[in-house]
Image: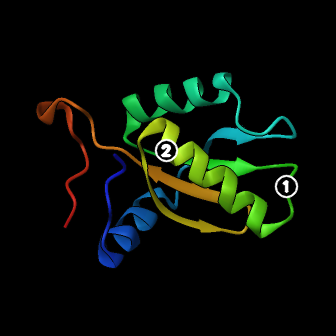
Amino acid sequence: MVMQLTGSQRKYLRGLAHHLNPGAFVGAKGVTQALVDEIETALDGAELIKIKFVDHKDKEIKAGLLDEISRRSNAAVAGMVGHVAVLYRPHTNPEKQRIHLP
């Protein structure tokens, strides 16, 4: 189940992600198992990542792909601006959690 974030939590996470470089790129092939694995690995290490859509111009298509990525990686969407989305998933071990939501 994907966690739900409040508006202030999403804003806080977007602020933290501002300086990050994209950790994964969604290309013409869309959401592949390799992409989901890459996102899973990045989320396990950082809790907060950016993903960039490189071959998709249509907002509805990007929203659909982002929804699928969110469901398959069990991550919350903190926001999407242009071609870049921010995903958040807290570490499963509470002692290793680096981000504490307001």
The structure residue drawn at horizontal position 82% and vertical position 40%, both measured from the top left corner, is 27
The structure residue drawn at horizontal position 54% and vertical position 50%, both measured from the top left corner, is 20
Cα distance, mark 2 to mark 1? 19 Å
The structure residue drawn at horizontal position 30% and vertical position 73%, both measured from the top left corner, is 6
Image location (x, y in percent) of residue 86: 52, 56
Q: Quadrant of residue 7?
A: bottom left
Label 2 sits on residue: 71
Image location (x, y in percent) of residue 84: 66, 58
Q: Is residue 80 above or below residue 38?
A: below
Number of numbered tags placed on the structure image = 2
**Quadrant position of the C terminus in the picture:** bottom left
- Position of 78 compared to 4: left or right? right
Image location (x, y in percent) of residue 34: 66, 22
Image location (x, y in percent) of residue 42: 49, 31
- Position of 52 compared to 2: left or right? right
Disc 1 marks a residue whose amino acid type is His
Disc 2 marks a residue whose amino acid type is Arg
Disc assigned to residue 56? 1
Whether tag 2 and tag 1 are in contact, CB under 8 A, the answer is no
Circle 1 SS class: loop
Count residues near mark 2 (Cα–Cα under 10 Å), then give few for <14, some for 14-19, many for 20+.
Answer: some
Q: Is residue 33 above or below residue 20?
A: above
Q: Nearer the viewer, residue 97 or 63?
A: 63
The structure residue drawn at horizontal position 37% and vertical position 50%, both measured from the top left corner, is 2
Q: Is residue 100 above or below residue 1?
A: below
